[in-house]
Amino acid sequence: MFAEKTGKIILVCLVIALAGAGFLAGYRGASCLWGPKAVALAVDESLDTDADGLADLLEITVHHTDPTRPDTDGDGYADGLEVANGYSPLHGESRRMVDVDTDRDYLNDDWEVKAGTDLTDPDSDGDLYLDGTEVAAAYDPLDPNPVRVSKRIDVDLKTQTLSYYLDEKLVESFPISSGLPGTPSPVGNFSVLDKVPVKHYGGPGFDFPNTKWNLLFHRSGSGTGYYVHGAYWHDNWGHPMSHGCINVPYERMERLYWWAQHGTPVVIR
């Protein structure tokens, strides 16, 4: 999963209603039955009928936009421009792909595209489990068999960056704030020990009640707990700020908290 398509010509099976013969003018070796039928097409990946910066193949098979209209959602921005900048070409009002869930399967459109699942089909592999449910439980949403996939959270203290992976493919990466020199974050291989929805952090000189989305990954010999958690009291991302925990922007942490499971590896280096 999360595999990228390669090659100039791909044979695809589509279920579409074709508007007319003119739509097929740029396709080589096309054959079809008119109307909403299964159509086998040899498609030139570089073809962009509406010149919106998004190839027809991607419009039809991935984003479900209209390859004959450069601005499918009518918001004034070309489909290709929106996709390149992380915005949804299907939903207006400048909504980001990571914030919309077209098929309501609990997997946002950005993650659907990365996973290779169908963002208009809540059960891409037809196994009667929602795509989002499978990803949350670490199962492959593209295989009807109960195939497990790996998860990993990786924190790079040098670059102050957190990245997390599903089946070794990047899901998201963003700046964080780790421990200050006097209160460094632990380094090593850990795992999520507990998920705590809301926690109160306090000590000499700091008091942060009602902190959401906390992933416990380590306890020191003295019993001190170290968490990856949301932080609402600063926005100095990319710089050490904490007492040893890994601070994450709230909007990012909500998704990470949902995605992570007990036992998910946490690597801090």
Image (cartoon, grey):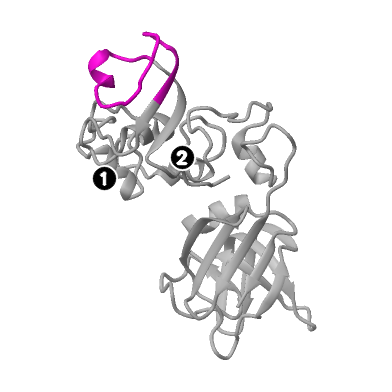
Q: Nearer the viewer, residue 180 or 172?
A: 172
Left or right: residue 61 compared with residue 141: left
Query: Is 145 part of what is drawn in magenta?
Result: no
Q: Nearer the viewer, mark 1 or mark 2?
A: 1
Left or right: residue 267 compared with residue 78: right
Q: Which residue is mark 1?
A: 81
Q: Nearer the viewer, residue 207 or 113?
A: 113
- Relative to 33, residue 87 above or below: below
Secondary structure beneath label 1: helix
Residue 197 seen in this snapshot: no
Q: Quadrant of residue 78?
A: top left
- Relative to 175, residue 11 above or below: above
- Which range is magenta? 17-41
Residue 44 screen position, x and y as percent: 33, 34
Residue 5 screen position, x and y as percent: 46, 43
Secondary structure beneath label 2: helix
- Relative to 70, residue 151 above or below: below
Left or right: residue 244 compared with residue 190: left
Q: Residue furthest bottom?
A: 182
Q: Residue at x 31, y 37 (%)?
A: 55
Amino acid identity at mark 1: Leu
Q: Which residue is mark 2?
A: 109
Numbered mark located on residue 110 in the image: none
Q: Quadrant of residue 125?
A: top right
- Relative to 154, residue 97 above or below: above
Q: Residue furthest front?
A: 29
Q: Label 1 neighbourhood size at 10 Å, few (<14), some (14-19), many (20+)? A: some
Q: Earlier in the sequence, mark 1 or mark 2?
A: 1
Tally of marks: 2
